[in-house]
Image (tube, rainbow, N blue to C red):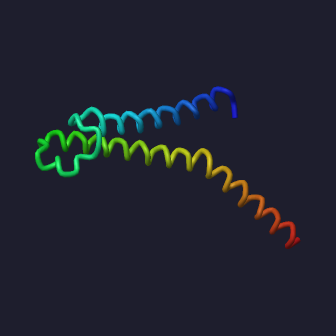
Amino acid sequence: MRKWMKFLHWFIIFIFILEIGYGFYMVFFVVGGSRWPLMAKAIETPIEVILKRRLYAIETWIAIAGLAVYLALTEFLPISIKIIAQNYELFRSKSD
């Protein structure tokens, strides 16, 4: 892999991790002023705050899913394809 492509790869991973961290920070420390999950305080919390927290939580889950898909396509899929190709070559050479 070329140097700039490797840099771009790690930059994309960094952006995903940064987005995940930002989402956690917004959900648990900024929106609503609470440091932990709302639990019983959810009854007294205005619906706007709950909806904001929920939207940031959804954004965080989307970033987590995006990172998982990106890593699956760029890291794990090429390794799996190599292993399958090697097994196919071994099977083909034994059958000849």
Q: Position of residue 64 (x, y in %)?
A: 43, 45
Q: Position of residue 13 (x, y in %)?
A: 53, 36
Q: Which one is in front, 77 or 65?
A: 65
Q: Classify residue 93 by image quadrant.
A: bottom right
Residue lying at 36% horizontally and 39% vertically, measured from the top left: 24
Residue lying at 51% horizontally and 32% vertically, measured from the top left: 14
Q: Quadrant of the N terminus?
A: top right
Residue 95 horizontal side relative to residue 3, left or right: right
Q: Position of residue 56 (x, y in %)?
A: 29, 40
Above or below for 96 versus 59 = below
Q: Which one is in front, 74 or 13?
A: 13
Residue that lies at the very extreme toward the top in this rendered image: 4
Residue lying at 31% horizontally and 44% vertically, measured from the top left: 57
Q: Count how many numbered circles sit on residues in the image.
A: 0
Residue 3 horizontal side relative to residue 62, left or right: right
Q: Position of residue 48 (x, y in %)?
A: 14, 40
Residue lying at 76% horizontally and 64% vertically, measured from the top left: 88
Residue 62 horizontal side relative to residue 92, left or right: left
Q: Quadrant of the C terminus?
A: bottom right
Q: Which one is in front, 44 or 1?
A: 44
